[in-house]
Structure formats: structure tokens, C-alpha cells
Amino acid sequence: MENAAIPMEIIIGSGYVKYEVLNPLIQYAYAGSKATNLNIFVDLTSLLRKAIEENNEVGRYEISSDVSISADIINLCAHYREYFGRMGVITRFYLIYGRNCPSENIIFCGRDYNAKFTSKVFLQNQMMKMIDKNLSLLSILCTSLPGIYFFNIENYEVAGFIEHIINLYGFDRVDLYPDMENMIVSKDILPWQLIPRRCTVLRPRKFKGNDTSFIVTKQNMWAEFAKVRQVDAQSLNMIDIKYLSNVLAMTRVPERNLLSIKNIPVVFKTILKGIELGLLPQTIMEHQLPQSTVNYALGLLEMATNYTTLEMRWKAISSSFAAEAIFPNNPIWSTVLFRDVYDPNGLKEIVSRYYENSPIDLDRL
């Protein structure tokens, strides 16, 4: 008996965290916070990745209508807006889609960088054409929705773009925004690099029908990293979380098809030794520590490795490098504007004309 096709709504629905699961996660992550404003960055690429990679050529997914994906994404915003609205918190959503494979990263790491994903993107099969159509619809819908902004950043890395926005607007600065917090909704590990930038990462996850979602914070990042990478967490908490980009550069990153150079326990042991000898900082003052600094210490510790490769991998992975060296030099993305042109009548007309079979929950927006 053939397996029944999976409704496409389940793909976007996997980004929903049930309120009863969300309650303890938010209470833990924002204990003591008096914030009344929350920026929610939604990593659309990570939510759509599974459907893109499986490409639907064998009919694995059932698509109810050709606009359902965009409707489901907007309803995802409604889900979280209603939840935080009950707490008196104003939400703004930044929906970001990028292929996570900029040309710079191909130069840094070769053509294998994120190749499993991008090979399916550029096939332009039925699924990818459907997604592209819905992304175009999102760009239209969001111009009429209050506080919901959509960005298709083409080949660029989503994590780097989020950090670019934070840099441009200073969203991590308590002096500018004392009543604001930032949360990223993503299934990818690279956005974890932004946790020191006054961010948490909500990781939606479903397993055998159960909602097993978790939230990553400054306090639990290394513990969650150990779970995701299935390693012993004992020594991980002993180093600054800002070393994450360096750890990723030196170890395996299956999310980008990067093989391991050194295993995780060896990397942590070496960084700890560098800190103990005063070769590496115990507390990192920058947003992230350049790999060149780590490489200098590794050289003194006589670690056998290709330091140029580590440097190039760090540049590809580092959200700070993208935010400081790539996006500011891009004429399209050097500035990022948020336009609030709320048009309820125009929105109702669009929804009634195109979304009759894929309803959008306007009442919760």
C-alpha cells in the first residue's frame, strides 16, 4: 500500500509551536523581561528546506492550492502575533528567504557548499516553481499587512542578513530599545550565532506527532548544541558562546554540507587550553572572534591543520562577516527599509480574490 501524500500545510505548520509548549519556553527565555516589543525573524528557508530537498517529483506532498504556502506563512505570523498579543507585546515580523549559498561562499569553500539544497533549488521543478510563486505573493501581501516585512535575499545567508538588520537598526542595544527583545524562528544552526546579539532562537520541532520544540538562549546554547551534535556537554559550557562561529568552522556543518576538519571534543579541548595559557580570550568583546585570532593560537599549540581552509570556512559561516563585509557592500542590501503601508481594504480584496480556498486569518493579524 502506497504512503498517502503529506499535505503541504504540514511543512509550514511544522514552524508552529503549540501555545502549551510555547508557554514554558517563553517563560524560561524571557524571565524577568519587561519588554513590550518583540522582533520576530522567521527563517523561511529552514521551514521550506525539507520540501525543496525532497522536490516532490514523486508526489510526496499534496498541495491544496497554488497559493496555500503564502497563506500558511502569513497564518504562522498570526499564530505568534496572537500569542504575544495576549501578553500585551507588540510583534513585528521579518520573513526572510535566502538560498544560503552566496557566490562568496563558493569561492571560500568550493562548489560543495550547501550543494544538496541548492541543486534542488535550481532544478526549478514543480515544487520550486510553486514556492517561487508564493514568495512573490508574499512580497505583495506584506505591503498591506501591519508590521510584517518580507525579504527575498536571493543567494545570501539568512543568518548574515538578520545580523545585518540588527547592525543597521541597533536592535541589540538596550540604550536605544530598552523595551525590545528579538527572537528568531529557525530550524537552522547558523542563526544561533546571533544569540549574543540580544536574540533567542525558537527551534520548532515535531517528532512522532509530538511538539518537541525548544528555545536556545545564552544560558543553554552549548547544552543544546551538544544535543544537536550528539556529543558530551561536560566541557562545552566552559567557553564563551561567541566561539560558536569558530567551532562551526573547525567541525562538521551538515547544514551546509561541510565535513569535519576536527572533531568537536578536540576543538573544545584546544580552545580551553588556549584560554588557560592566555592565548585566547576567556570573554570575547567583539560580536564574534575572527578565525585568524584562533588560528594564531592553534599554531602556537601546534595543531596540525590547514589554517587557510579554517579561515575560509569561518568567512562562509560567520554571520558577522556577512553582516560587516558582504551586505554593506551590496548596492541592493546596503540599506534595509521597513515600509508600513497598511491597506485593509486592498488586503481584503486580494484575500477574497486569490485566497478563497486558502483562508488567511485576518482577524488575528
Image: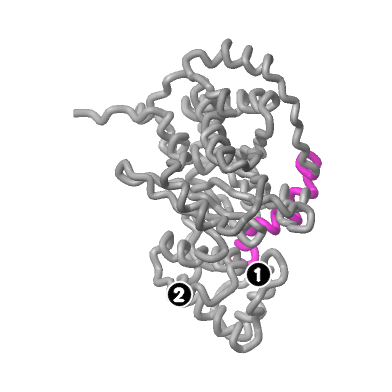
Give the residue at x 46% y 18%: 65
Instruction: Give whichever of 139, 82 is nearer the camera.
Output: 82
**Disc 1 target residue:** 291
Q: Position of residue 159 (x, y in %)?
A: 62, 50
Q: Are marks 1 and 2 in contact (CB under 8 Å)?
A: no
- Residue type indicated by callout 2: Pro
| Direction from residue 181 to residue 341 in the image, left or right | right
Q: Position of residue 355 (x, y in %)?
A: 53, 16
Give the residue at x 68% y 75%: 293
State the quadrant of the C terminus. top right
User: Which of the 4 image quarters holds residue 84?
Assistant: top right
Q: In this view, which residue lies farthest toward the left?
A: 1
Please, which colouring scheme is shown? one colour
In the rendered image, is residue 51 in sight?
A: yes
**Disc 2 target residue:** 265
- Residue type indicated by callout 1: Gln
253 inside magenta stretch: no
User: Which of the 4 image quarters holds residue 242?
Assistant: bottom right
Query: Which SS type dominates the magenta stretch?
Result: helix
Which numbered marker is on residue 52? Answer: none
Instruction: Give whichever of 347, 262 is nearer the camera.
Output: 347
Mark 1 element type: helix
Q: Is residue 179 above or below residue 52?
A: below
Instruction: Give whichever of 57, 75 is nearer the camera.
Output: 75
Q: Which residues are magenta?
A: 309-334
Q: Is residue 360 above or below residue 32?
A: above
